[in-house]
Image (cartoon, rainbow, N blue to C red):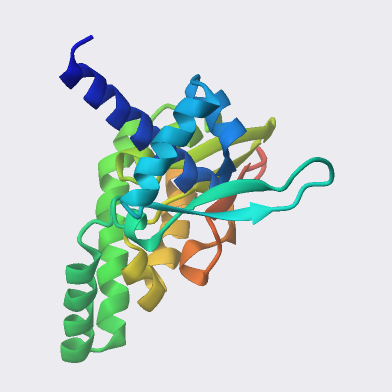
Amino acid sequence: MNRHAVYFKEQEKRREILVLLKKRRSVNVQELSKHLGITKVAVRKHLDVLHRERYIDSRIVRQRTGRPAYVYHLTNTAEQLFPRHYSDLATELVAGIQDLYGEAFVDQLFEKRMGRILQNYREVMRGQGFDERVKTLASIQKEQGYMPHLEKIRDGLYTLEEANCPVLQVAVRYRQACKCELSLFESLVDAHVERTSCIAEGQVKCRYLIKEKLNNEES
């Protein structure tokens, strides 16, 4: 393997570390070694580079047995590496609309956006069963940069976690964004959807419970 190939392979490993930290919030060397399939020594070399670039920081966690261990987490600098969908510009534009036309017009703006998304994806889900619709929703959110993790709890019940919010700055200021997203999920999947945590409210992830409707319930 030539020098350039080695460089790009190392870059890829460091990207994997950043993505894992984004999803799990904090990890230790042993967890990284297992996830990446490389030695702890190799992991520490990557961590040293990321620390010098100010993408990660660490803290000591005391364990029940053995010596205290370092766990690593992303810095604010690293957070900027993940999709944000031009959130600064979007926030300014929505603020301008609110100043010109009022709060009610902002509500209509988000509702129209939801309507367009519904129109685009309903055809994709046509004919799909509940499980397929939920998986399609997770796939859509992945394409949009939300870094979702879907888990089936039991028949008719899923959890969907999103580690990233590409429109975070907009959602923090205009909660209509979160409200419309919840309505969008319910309409697309035709299911009961409950949000149990929200990044815009200061939680680590957005988390949803998605429950299949009973046969005798109206769509």
In the image, taking residue 147 as reference, residue 217 lies left or right, namely right
Q: Tell me which residue sits at (41%, 54%) in the image.
A: 184
* Residue farthest right in this picture: 64
Identify the residue at horizontal 23%, vertical 56% (top origin): 85
Question: Could you tell me which residue is drawn at 47 percent across and 39 percent down?
Answer: 20
Residue 35, horizontal then vertical, whole percent: 53, 26
**Identity of the residue drawn at 52% across and 62% down:** 198
Residue 190 shows in the view: no
* Residue 196 shown left or right of residue 168 in the figure: right
Quarter of the N terminus within the rendering? top left
- Whole-percent x and y of residue 42? 45, 26
Q: Position of residue 132 (x, y in %)?
A: 48, 28
Say how many tags the image has.
0
Does residue 172 appear to the left or right of 167 in the view shown?
right
Q: Is residue 86 visible?
A: yes
Q: Position of residue 45 (x, y in %)?
A: 42, 34
- Relative placement, left or right, of 147 versus 157 is left
